[in-house]
Amino acid sequence: MWNQLEIRQRYNQRIYIFLAAVVCMVVILFGRMVQLQWIQYTEHFTQAEDNRIHVSPILPTRGMMTDRYGLGLAVNEISYKVTIIPERVEDMDASLAKVQVLMGWTDKQVDKMKKQVKQSRSDRAVMLMDQLPWQAVAPLAARLHHFSGVDVVAGTHRYYPHAIETSHMVGYLSLVRDVDIKKGYLSMEYVGRSGLERILESRLHGELGYKHEEVDAKGRRVSLLKTVSPKIGENIQLSLDVTLQHVAAKALKGRTGAVVVLDVNTGEVLTLLSQPGYDSNKFITGLETKQWKAWLEDKQRPLLNRTTQAAYPPGSTIKMVTSFAGLRNDIRLARGSTYCKGYVELADRQIRCWKKEGHGKVDLHAALVHSCDVYFYELGDELGMSRLTAEASLWGFGERTGINLPPESRGNLPEEEPDGRRKNWYRGETMITAIGQGEVTVTPLQMARFAAAIANGGKILTPLLEKGQPIEIVREVDVSDEDLKEVRQGMRDVVAQPTGTAHAALGRAHWPVAGKTGTAQVVMMADDEERSFSDAKKHQDHAWFMGYAPFENPQIAIAVFVEHGGHGGSSAAPVARAVFDAWADKVDTTLEKH
Amino acid sequence: MNTLRRMDQILLLCLVLLAIFGMATLYAAVHAGDLTVWYKQGVYWLIGSVAFLVMCFVPLRLIGLLVWPVYLLALLALVLVPFIGDVHMGARRWLDLGIVNLQSSELMKWALILLLASWFSMREASSFRDLSVALVCVLLPAALIVIQPDLGTALVLMLAAMAIIMVAGFPWKWFVGLLAASPFAGYILWQKMHDYQRGRVLSFLNPESDPLGRGYHVIQSAIAIGSGGIFGKGYLEGSQSRLHFLPEQHTDFIFAVLAEEGGLIATAVLFLLYGVLISRILMIALRAHTRFAGLICVGMASIFFLYVFVNIGMVSGMLPVVGVPLPFISYGGSALLSMLVAMGLIMRVAIESEGKVSWQRPTSPLG
């Protein structure tokens, strides 16, 4: 019936084919293994390591900022946070309710926490409350064994002990935003937002450390593999003398203004006060929008740093510039005298001296001592605008001082435009510029630097914020010893002569002071109006004082600016007195000790 | 004793080595947690060995007598499953027989192979009438298994049947025709599939599309295998398995544990063992004293090989995830037991054929 041989042959043949098919498929499988385990080995090994190893960052401790004597300006305070690991809590609502009673939290806060817990991983600690003092967490900490999954963890937060006085300079931190995270910051980090906290961010921040942990598929920690310690941020000692800053703040109390004190030889900033200040600690605890808005809308503008970011008409404090310009350009009047009858006539107008009845015969020295406007009107008139502004530029006006605290205003000099549009000034404009009115504006820091330059013989220094930084001389003004002596003596007698404008405030200062008062008009008045025409605060004059001490061998220079403060001699000079005396007492006691 | 001395020693050696290999790998898969599974598998090996030895003494003629009753019993069990079966992992596959949970499709595999071997022991697979009877015998249980639903086993069943039919002389022309028709069959199958099965197929086609869902298993097992490299991470050192990144690492995905810890060398050794075992079974098929005995070996070899191929293909990301164990390595009592019974049957073929002339003309399984 069948061809037996054929059947047997076919059977054998088919088994061999079957065997060949099996071998082929095993080769395919083995090829797949070679691909996975040999060719793609590195890739898969990396993926397995990524699975296995969870790298979590350890935040570095932020560097502190201290004043020149080591007093803390931006420090790290120990604080406590309450955390919860959801998967270790049996009844979340009941546990939170008990914790709430101990901590005294509001229902609203607890509702927010519950929401946060729901959104978080159940095996990782969720932060319920941050920046708590020990007193606040102590009741909970003592009963922790009753609360499974709840923990009290110690950490640090930024604290500014002298926030109100130093906030403009030191600045503040706030919690990261999405933009920062893109730059590589981690969530829960704080970033410098303003002042030196922002500018010195890279040095203060330090470097992240890392914790390599082995985790299982559910992300639970199995073991700690290795730890890379974080690098603590740099501690930075500033040149500031916070005690002196407090003296200045106290002297300026209640008024709006600025005080800058510089070391005349190094340019180190000893005081950089802008008032009113604000409490920068509020940024750390989480600033409420209401507070932020209030600060922004406050007419006194507490967030503005008046020492560097705002420029004001300098008034009579600019008269030294006019003096130097006159002497440099050998204007006859600078070495001669004129007669002040209380005003000068220009066309059909009268431009008045502040002293209605006039100063009589005045030379440069007398004009500085009594701050005679007429003398400087005439001197300015002879100089012309370009020589006046050129001199002001030499002494550092109209340019940024280069202090490492941007943004900084450069002030304004009525300079010639490149297209020559304003080349021809009216004589009246030049004359009022010579007494620090009109278009000229300066920052208090520029003014302090000017005082320092007169004191140190013409060296324009970059104001330095850190102690022991190398001195930076922007330029040395070429000024002859006789001219310098002339102006200095004028400034000295502003204080020393009983009729000098600052004698009342500074005549009895502990050190001999040289300086100049300034009263800058805010509103130009018509000829027939009285100076004291208005009680309105915003129409009151700005008060200035600039100067240095001691007269021989000067050490510190100051600029005091009081916004709408009235007269320089009575409003600004007393602030300088307080600062000079405080500094003198400190230096003298130190000298006595040695 | 004479019977035992006539056992095929290479086959026996392969089985012993696989037992050692399997127990060692299973230990690696479970050592981090509960060892109960490992001890239980040891007991299954002991029971299985006894069953293996018993099978060595069962004459093939007796088995030839039992072919139809066993098949009908298995069919009955399959029919009963939908009514009294135990829902296990979303699929009704288990029949609770009091002492043992019997997987009814497991029984059907062997019953069907015996039936086909017996049917074609005297018939060539070129007669249309004879083929249709066989086809009904195959498709009926296959359909029942598909609706359980257990697509993997159904496919294995049909492919094993195909292997027997091919060796029994199925004409090539028809085979080519069948191949051409398979896309349509595939389409109909897709329509009949359950959502979870379609999901598995889809996630196999593009595992990265759903890395934490269905694709997660395949990605993690591919990572585990690949990260083993050539020499492996060392015994009990596999991080993917130790830290539970592998799914079902003691059952279906146990191959990944072996590959991660033993590397390409261990996988090569395992492939060698499987390869030798399968070729040995086919050698026995070649020198079998009856056609019935030979066809039994072919069927067993094909089922065994399909399990190996589908499992490793799935774990290494070449095939969709279907729940098929890796023979002798995966944890699981009934799979191991039935596999050892099958090996015992093959050993019986080797024993009976020893010293006899191979068949020259097809005869009834009853001799």
Image (tube, grey):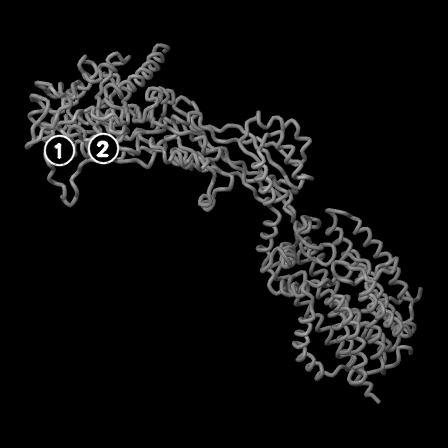
Question: Which badge, 1 or 2, comes first in the chain's sequence?
Answer: 1
| Above or below, B182 relative to A262 | below
Residue at point 80%, 83% (across, down): A7
Tell me the CA gap for discs 1 and 2. Answer: 14 Å
Quadrant where the image shows the C terminus of chain A: top left
Q: In which image quadrant can residue A389 be found?
A: top left
The residue at the far right in this view is: B1
Residue that carries the numbered disc 1 in the rendered image: A430
User: Horizontal placement of B161 versus B312: left or right?
Assistant: right
> Which dot marks residue A441?
2
Please tell me whether mark 1 sits on a helix, a strand or a loop.
Answer: helix
Q: Mark 1: few, some, or many residues within 10 Å (few <14, many ≥20)?
A: many
User: Could you say where residue B272 lies in the image, as x and y percent from the top left?
Assistant: 72, 63
Amino acid at the residue labelled 2: Thr
User: Could you say where residue B167 lies in the image, as x and y percent from the top left?
Assistant: 77, 78
> Viewer-proximal residue, B8 or A502?
A502
